[in-house]
Image (spheres, grey):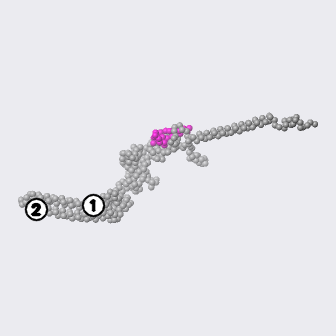
């Protein structure tokens, strides 16, 4: 038997039981391959994430906008402006003499006729002055009669050469002076009678009492510029309406054209009016022309001082007038412009001419078509050639969904 512990036997045993060099090489190559695969997958993943981030950033850089399309002016060129309603005639009644209010005979809302009494004043000072003036007039009449008798007698004696002509002329002159004094006294009486008649305040024309400040026992002083009128009488059978028309539309608003009034207290009701006068001048502060309209008021629905919307049907038949929201207009150094979007999302800035600005909407005359897509509320920094994304209106999606459900 051989000894198993000999060196030869040990070497043979180690070689047969341990890993060979070839096996180790294979394991190393496999580990390197796995590492390369892991690195490659990580690199590809990072590149893909970077590309996605770049795409997201590029998409975020393109603004999303909402668009509107111009619409044909359905109002037919109507011009709607605010107006102020006034009475056809309105008179403030003041006292023309000093006194106290004894009684008032009409109150606000009462309809009065021309000459109807509104209030009665006590005027004791005028009454006493009138009594004295009448007494002075009687004295003047007595002196006039005496002077007349004396002048007649001296004229008879002059015919008989009993007195000189100088003396007769003096008596005739005294009679003329007495007549003038009598006439002056009579004029003073009539003046005080007129003042006494002012103790009764009356309506100058038929109308409605729209204000009253007279109170029983109140002291009234004539000629006081700061005094409040005791009454105001307004003729409301017809009304005047005053409107300030912008200069840009003043050439279309001429005397004789019709207009329609609408008041907030009468929704759904309109009142016919006719333009009667124009100031024919542009106010430097407001840049508008003042015009006057008249409207019949048989039922008293129109009230003095009321606010009304006045609609002028001007520019009817102008097919080139389109409406846009006021938010779609850009105002710059070059005037008003709009931002159009083509089917590829490219922006074009186009100038427009605003025929009329109605606040929420504007009327544009020419330069646009109903098929144009215009950015609503465009940013101030938008320029020609910019790219944008058009936001799809939610209303259209809802309508489409509703239509599908209906089917």
Neighbor class of circle 2 (other Cα within 10 Å; few <14, some 14-19, many 20+) is few
Q: Earlier in the sequence, mark 2 or mark 1?
A: 2
Query: Residue at left 36%, top 60%?
Result: 212
| Horizontal arrangement in the rendering, residue 28 relative to residue 83 (left or right) | right
Vertical comparison of 273 with 211: above or below: above
Neighbor class of circle 1 (other Cα within 10 Å; few <14, some 14-19, many 20+) is some
Number of marks present in the image shown: 2
**Farthest left residue in view:** 161
Element under disc 1: helix
Which residue is more in the foreground, 239 or 352?
352
Query: Residue at left 15%, top 58%?
Result: 176
On the image, the x and y values in percent for residue 67 come to 53, 43
Query: Residue at left 63%, top 38%?
Result: 51
Q: Quadrant of the N terminus?
A: top right
| Horizontal arrangement in the rendering, residue 257 relative to residue 49 (left or right) | left
On the image, the x and y values in percent for residue 115 come to 31, 60
Residue extent of the magenta highlight: 329-354
- Residue 260 in sight from this viewpoint: no
| Horizontal arrangement in the rendering, residue 224 relative to residue 406 (left or right) | left
**Gap between marks 2 and 1 measured at Cα:** 41 Å
Which residue is more in the foreground, 163 or 206?
163
Would you name the residue on which mark 2 appears?
Answer: 153
- Residue 66 in sight from this viewpoint: yes
Which residue is more in the foreground, 74 or 332?
332
Vertical comparison of 167 with 350: above or below: below
Vertical comparison of 121 with 336: above or below: below
> Would you say residue 155 sits in the magenta stretch?
no
Would you name the residue on which mark 1 appears?
Answer: 195
Element under disc 2: helix
Q: Which mark is residue 382?
A: none
């Amino acid at each position: 038997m051989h000894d198993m512990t000999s060196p030869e036997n040990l070497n043979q045993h180690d070689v047969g039981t341990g890993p060979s060099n070839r096996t180790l090489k294979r394991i190393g190559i496999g580990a390197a391959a796995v590492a390369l695969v892991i690195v490659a997958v990580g690199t590809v993943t990072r590149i893909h994430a970077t590309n996605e981030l770049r795409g997201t950033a590029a998409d975020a850089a393109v603004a999303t906008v909402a668009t509107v399309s111009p619409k044909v002016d359905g109002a037919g060129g109507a011009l709607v402006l605010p107006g102020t309603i006034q009475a056809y005639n309105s008179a403030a009644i003041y006292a023309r003499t000093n006194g106290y209010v004894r009684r008032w005979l009409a109150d606000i809302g009462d309809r009065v006729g021309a000459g109807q009494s509104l209030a009665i004043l006590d005027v004791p000072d005028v009454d006493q002055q009138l009594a004295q003036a009448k007494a002075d007039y009687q004295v003047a009449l007595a002196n006039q009669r005496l002077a007349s008798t004396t002048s007649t007698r001296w004229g008879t004696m002059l015919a008989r050469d009993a007195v000189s002509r100088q003396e007769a002329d003096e008596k005739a002159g005294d009679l003329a002076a007495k007549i003038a004094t009598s006439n002056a006294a009579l004029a003073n009486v009539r003046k005080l009678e007129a003042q006494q008649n002012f103790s009764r305040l009356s309506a100058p024309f038929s109308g409605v009492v729209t204000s009253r400040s007279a109170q029983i026992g109140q002291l009234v002083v004539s000629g006081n510029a700061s005094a409040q009128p005791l009454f105001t009488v307004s003729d409301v059978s017809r009304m005047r309406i005053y409107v300030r028309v912008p200069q840009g539309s003043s050439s279309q608003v001429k005397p004789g054209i019709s207009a329609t009034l609408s008041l907030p207290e009468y929704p759904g009701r309109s009142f016919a009016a006719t333009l009667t006068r124009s100031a024919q001048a542009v106010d430097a502060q407001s840049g508008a022309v003042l015009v006057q309209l008249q409207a019949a008021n048989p039922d008293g629905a129109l009230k003095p001082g009321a606010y009304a919307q006045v609609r002028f049907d001007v520019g009817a038949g102008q097919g080139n007038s389109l409406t846009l929201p006021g938010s779609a207009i850009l105002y710059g150094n070059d005037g008003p412009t709009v931002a159009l979007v083509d089917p590829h999302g490219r922006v074009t800035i186009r100038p427009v001419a605003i025929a009329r600005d109605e606040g929420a909407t504007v009327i544009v005359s020419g330069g646009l078509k109903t098929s144009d897509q215009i950015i609503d509320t465009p940013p101030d920094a938008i320029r020609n050639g910019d790219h944008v994304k058009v936001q799809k209106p939610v209303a259209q999606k809802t309508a489409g969904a509703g239509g599908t459900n209906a089917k």
